[in-house]
Image: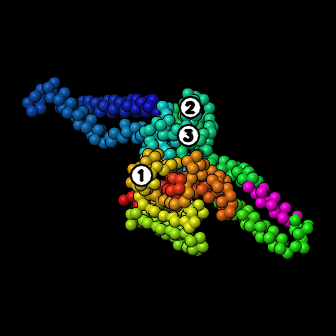
Amino acid sequence: MQEDLAALIRKTAAQVRARDFLWSAVITALIGLAVVLFGPSEASLFGLPRHIWLPGVCWIAFLAAIGVRYRLSSGREWALPVERVVASEINAQQAELESLRLARGVATALPEPLFILDAAGVIDHANPAAEEFLGATNLEGRHFAAALRAPNVFEAAEAVAKGEAAHAVDFSTIGPVERHCRAFVAPLDEQERPGRILVYVRDLTSERRVEQMRADFVASASHELRTPLASLIGFIETLRGHAKDDPEAREKFLSIMQAQAERMQRLVADLMSLSRIELHEHVPPAGSVDLAVLAEDVIESSRPVFEQSSAIVDFQNLDDAPIMVPGDRDELFQAVQNLIDNAIKYGGEPAMIKVKAGRGAAPSMSQDGEVAHRSGDTAAQLAGRLGLDVDRLAFIQIRDFGPGVERSDLPRLTERFYRVNIERSKKSGGTGLGLAIVKHIINRHKGGLQVESRLAGGTAFTCYFPLSPEGSA
């Protein structure tokens, strides 16, 4: 384009110079002809001889003619090629800007994370989905390896920057909730800025969770339903055999069969609930919940159970103010209800339960001077992991004063079907999934679960959550 512009200017300048030369020659000829035809023959003009005044008159006439020439000429001949090239450049730049706006708009609207890197691996652009995926803002200017902790993805980006073809890389993120992803790394074909790389990330967590959920459901159902099904089959065979005409035996066996069927019903319901929670565990909740109000609602809805078991429940809001956290109300309600039900079952006869909600670090069982065993996240550990101050956390604590839990059992309490006291659990109708459900609900809410226990001193379950922005003001 620059060579074309230079050639156009040279050609235009030559044409203008040629016209000026012809114009000057014509003017000079006309002046000479006028002098010859109409000039005085004697050397008398204001008393000056002919050889003095004649050149002066010719020079003045020539300047006047040239002045008229330049006065009538607009100089547009010189500007036309420049205007043409400049207009072409402006149109090209506007088309490129429009294309860039369109590309940025598409990238912004994409629900999946997208990064554009330069040849050195520094992020040039990251769409809102990428910021949400990494939980960070202002990613432009940061090195890709520091933003996304996935070495194999960065290695693929380096290989593409060196000229290799596009790569597809599977990776997993590290955190409370594991996420499975696939990154597509490809070069961007750009003449102005060669070496830039496109990284597009697809979240495959839901697909992987569906597969794992199916496998876990089949394994859990086949394992836990085997015993009650065998019991039902045995009782049915007995009722169809020698106990067929025995009313007392029939009534006894039917009662046991009903209890086993109800247990299977509870088990299937808990398995389905756990599967649903695990499926969406990587998706942050969108609502906002007041923990104090939630705890009061759970206690109020459980009044019939408390009266039936003679349990004593005391609730205390340590802040005497709303405690707002980001959350799904139904899931948090289920988690608190599971913990209170657990306290009723294992908190002694009758159970005495204390429920507390507040901000910052929760009261510890060790504060009264006696040693308590602990497992799970402390407030400081969770705050450090989330990059928050401890006072920007909220908690809800459910404590009972029952026999407590052995230290060796504490880390396994949230495992599926793990029971400290199998006979007591089955007698109380437990499925062994309640605390597993609580753990996955807390994980989805980016919280932490801490368990403290002392033999003959009771057990305290503390759920920590980050406060909502309006709750931490």
Image quadrant in which the C terminus is located: bottom left
Q: Amino acid at mark 3?
A: Val
Residue indicated by mark 1: 369
Percent position (x, y) of residue 467?
Answer: 44, 57
Per the model, the C-alpha gap separating discs 2 and 1 is 53 Å
| Residue under label 3 | 199
Q: Residue at x 55, y 42 (%)?
A: 174
Q: Is residue 193 above or below residue 449?
A: above
- Around disc 3, counting alpha carbons within 10 Å, would you say few (fewer than 14), some (14 to 19), or many (20 or more)? many
Q: Is residue 310 above or below residue 426?
A: below
Location of residue 265 in the rendering, given as x and y in whole percent from the top left corner? 72, 64
Image quadrant assignment for residue 422: bottom right
User: Mark 2 = which residue?
Assistant: 155
Res 142 seen here:
yes
Q: Is residue 196 magenta-colored?
A: no
Q: Does label 2 or label 1 sit earlier along the sequence?
A: 2
